[in-house]
Amino acid sequence: MIASLICVASVAAFVQFLISYCHSVVAAFGNVEVSQRVREVAGMGNRDLAMDDFARFLQLLHLCPEHQADRGEIRAVRIYHSLLRAIGRVSRALVPRVAAWTDRELMSCSHFAAVALDRRMEFSRDLFARQASIQ
């Protein structure tokens, strides 16, 4: 009984830490503007970001060479995004304020993924330039 209680408390603490960490990572990217280059690559044109853009940006991120600096953040935000979607589905009818919060956070996740894509594309360009200068 006590072991179960400790396990539940540990999982709850981990989820709370994960949400806090991911919220801070996503918020740190919030002031960075999404470049026109990313909009073109993602086929967005001039429209605003949408919650559903997250998956598209992740697909494009996987096409770029990995950068060790952002791998952990991207993985954490992907988990956070999945958790937010689940919370949003459950809370949509029960607690509309929570659903509104999850929608805002999902938009922030899409923005994060767009900025991360821009950084990966810049890293890829620099990597290619370095390799070209060696040869």
Image (cartoon, rainbow, N blue to C red):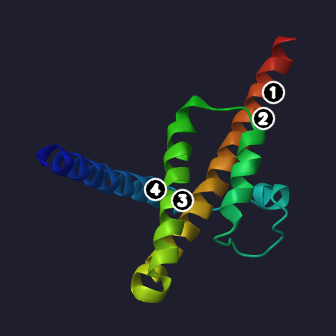
Report which quarter residue 71 is drawn in: top right
Which amino acid, by three-letter code, is at mark 1? Phe
Farthest top residue? 135
Q: List x then y, in percent, for residue 45.
A: 84, 70
Return the residue at label 2.
125
Q: List x then y, in percent, for residue 52.
A: 68, 68
Alpha carbon distance from label 1 to label 2:
5 Å
Alpha carbon distance from label 1 to label 4:
28 Å
Q: Do tag 3 and tag 4 residues touch (Cβ < 8 Å)? A: no
Seen at 34% across and 54% down, the residue is 15
Nearer to us of marks 3 and 2 is: 3
Instruction: Identify whether 7 is placed above or below 33.
Output: above
Return the residue at label 4.
28
Please tell me how crowded label 1 is: few (under 14), some (14-19), or many (20+) other residues with Cα within 10 Å: few
Residue 128, numbered label:
1
Nearer to us of marks 3 and 4 is: 3
Disc 4 secondary structure class: helix
Please tell me how crowded label 3 is: few (under 14), some (14-19), or many (20+) other residues with Cα within 10 Å: few
Residue 4, numbered label:
none
Nearer to us of marks 1 and 3 is: 3
If you read the primary sequence from the N terminus, does the residue marked by circle 3 or circle 4 appear first? Answer: 4
Please tell me how crowded label 4 is: few (under 14), some (14-19), or many (20+) other residues with Cα within 10 Å: few
Q: List x then y, in percent, for residue 56.
A: 74, 58
Residue 82, numbered label:
3
